[in-house]
Amino acid sequence: MITLREFTVDDAPHIVNYLNDSEVTQYITATIAHPYTSSDAQSWIEFSDNNPLIRAIECNGAFVGCISATAGRFEYSHSAELGYWLGREYWEQGIGTQAVQLFIDYLKSVTSLSRVYVSVVTRNTRSIRVC
């Protein structure tokens, strides 16, 4: 079962583990530190605290990744870019697809966004199938 929730301090070691895997980070934003440290994870958890646009992804009670939306500004203020990542051992299980569906439903209930879009690297065929 896939659920979305706020991050907790217990997620930090998993975040560090997942984001130090070059297979996980190869197609996501270059702003991810490398190597990714415990301090980086703590900063992320603090940044995401009470932020309705950032959620941890859980599968059967285990933390498996992150999903977020970056809201636009000015005339794009009702749009947001969706992004997500999953730990490699959770790929090819339909988790990304379910998480995106849950997150869009969640965003509809807590924001005034009218458009969510995704930018996908052409070689990232897994995310193309999800989105």
Image (cartoon, rainbow, N blue to C red):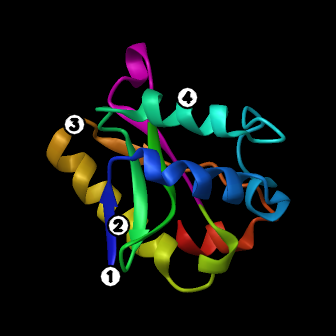
Per the image, the residue denoted by label 1 is 1
Q: Nearer the viewer, mark 1 or mark 2?
A: 1
Residue type (three-letter) at the residue carrying disc 3? Thr
Q: Residue at image x 39%, y 47%? A: 8
Q: Position of residue 125 (x, y in %)?
A: 73, 72
Residue type (three-letter) at the residue carrying disc 1? Met
Asked if residue 71 can be seen in this view, the reply is: no
Q: Is residue 46 left or right of residue 23?
A: left
Q: Position of residue 64 (x, y in %)?
A: 52, 67
Per the image, the residue denoted by label 4 is 43
Q: Secondary structure at mark 1?
A: loop
- Residue 101 circle label: 2
Q: Residue at image x 36%, y 38%? A: 53
CA gap between label 3 and label 1 equals 24 Å
Q: Is residue 62 above or below residue 19?
A: below
Q: Is residue 90 left or right of residue 20?
A: left
CA gap between label 4 and label 2 equals 27 Å
Discs 3, 1 touching: Cβ within 8 Å: no
Per the image, the residue denoted by label 3 is 111
Q: Nearer the viewer, mark 4 or mark 2?
A: 4
Q: Position of residue 26 (x, y in %)?
A: 81, 55
Q: Which residues are magenta?
A: 70-85
Residue type (three-letter) at the residue carrying disc 2? Gln
Dot 4 crowding, Cα within 10 Å, few <14, some 14–19, many 20+: few
Of the numbered discs 4 and 2, the one sitting upstream in the chain is 4
For residue 76: magenta? Answer: yes
Q: Is residue 18 above or below residue 78?
A: below
Of the numbered discs 4 and 1, the one sitting upstream in the chain is 1
Of the numbered discs 3 and 1, the one sitting upstream in the chain is 1
Count up the numbered dots. 4
Depth check, front residue: 5 or 69: 5
